[in-house]
Structure formats: structure tokens, C-alpha cells
Amino acid sequence: MEGSCLSKAIVSIPSRPTVSNGADTTQCGVLEAEFGFERQWPGAGAHRDDLSGGLRLGLTPHLDFHWTSSDFWNIVDENGTRTGFGDTWLGLKYHFLMQTKRRPSLGVFYQAKVPTADENNEIGSGEFDHAISFLVSKDISRFHLDFNVTPLLAGRHGAPGIDHNAGLALSFSIPLTRRLGLVGESYGSTFLNSQTQAFASTMAGFTYQVHPRLVLDTGIDVGVTAWAPRKRIYVGVTYAMANLYSVMRSNR
């Protein structure tokens, strides 16, 4: 374990651009950054711009820490134009079963939302939320598959109690060349409340590995049902910055 956590060979393990998460965790000791920009068209002439980012740290070979945030929102709809910072999510992912020829990898991912968004501008609910994802991953020939089931407990804005639903996501990825990859995904969720109805959506995109530590992504998302955003486009980057365990040991 010690040797694997002090490796100088650093490889990016992106969690972008899919909604689903793989059971694999961030390389042990490695600090990895992810940032992206997207524009959504929910319908009725509205659009939303989101600049988001996050950091991940591999704590052990099978456990990592996640921090993500919608760093900046720009929303244009029938209520006018609103800008502000989004909510922050903190999480831990544990990969507890490795895949074999006959069985998939399994993991669990707990996340808590810290309400840092401006609720007065209707960017966030102002409440704490909790989500726990059950992760299934499998390599089949050249394809990599990820399947997630994510129950969500969401605090009710301005009222006691919680709302709950479940999210489902299934994604695939396949290399097209040594650096270029194709990704696709179907995802959605059940009914949460009157403001967040059940929906389904689908996504297709590409990833490009500039370097083992640097991966770019881009793609388009199209809503399948009425309550899904009609369209979303995105670009993003993932960069494995350094092995902090190795740096701290060398500085002793």
C-alpha cells in the first residue's frame, strides 16, 4: 500500500463528463482538479450558464475525498437575469470490490450538499441535502460501463421535513484512437417535488487525453422527457496535479 501511494507515475482518472461515477477512485495520494463550463436551455426562451469545479484526493488505494461546487451561475428566464455562486458538495467514495472476468467492480459514494448558493436569487434551496450512490462498473471488451443508483434526501425550502427521490444513470466509454474517446449516457431521476419533476435525458460526447495527467472533454445533452432541459452543451478539463503523499515525504 505504501509503495502504491507514493508512486511518481501520475495518471488522471476523470469523473467528468458523465453524471454517473465509476467505482474506481482517484489514484492514492494524487490531488486532481476538474473544471467545466456548460450552457443549458431549459425551454421557454430561458438559458443557464454554469462554471463549475472541484478537487479530488486519493486518501487510500480504495477511498477518495471529493469537493465540488457550481462556482458561478448566470440564469436568464421569465424572472429576469440572476447571477451568483452555487452550492458546494463534499463526499467520500469507497471502492470495496474489484472486478473480475465474471463480476463488476462495486463502490459506494456518499455526498452532502452545503447550501452556499444564494437562495434569494433562487439559485439554491438554502437547505442541506444528502445523497448516497451505489456504483457498478465493468469492462466488456473495449467498452467501459458505469451504472449508478442514487437515493437523494433534499431539505425543503422554507418548510420542515425532506423530499426524496432516486437518480439512475448508465454510461459507456470506448477508445476511438490512442487519445480520443467516445462517451454516452442515459440518466434521469424520479419525482422529487413540484419544482423538480421526474425526467430523463441522454448525453453524447468526446474525451481527449492530451497527457496521462490531462484530459479534455466536450459534448451535448438532449432532454428525452418534458421536464428535462431541452439541450445542454459542455466543455471541461481534468488535471492530476501532484502526488501529495510523495511531495510530503520528500520534504521531510
Image (cartoon, helix red, strand yellow):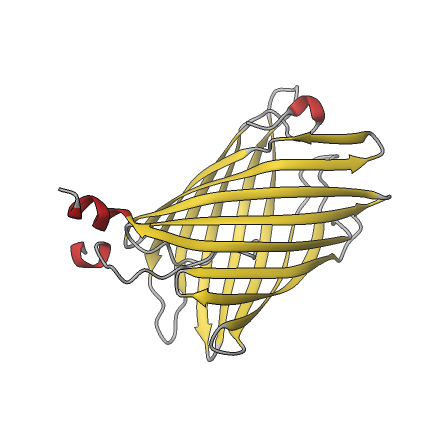
The residue sitting at the left extreme is 252
Q: Position of residue 153 (x, y in %)?
A: 55, 35
Q: Residue at x 75, y 58 (%)?
A: 224
Compared with 119, 34 (above or below) is below
Q: Is residue 20 visible?
A: no
Q: Is residue 212 left or right of residue 18?
A: left
Residue 130, relative to residue 145: is it above or below? Answer: above
Using the rendered view, name the quadrant where residue 191 is placed: top right
Place of residue 240 in the rendered image (x, y in percent of width and height, measured from the top left): 39, 54
Q: Quadrant of the N terminus?
A: bottom left
Residue 64, above or below 142: above
Q: Which of 202/243 is in front?
A: 243
Measured as percent of width and height from the top left, residue 59 is found at 29, 46
Q: Nearer the viewer, residue 167 or 246?
A: 246
Q: Position of residue 184 (x, y in %)?
A: 61, 66
| Residue in the image at 44% along x and 60% along y | 214
**What quarter of the picture does the C terminus occupy?**
top left
Q: Residue 99: tell me if it is visible.
A: yes
Closer to us: 69 or 185: 69
Question: What is the tally of numbered marks visible in this picture?
Answer: 0
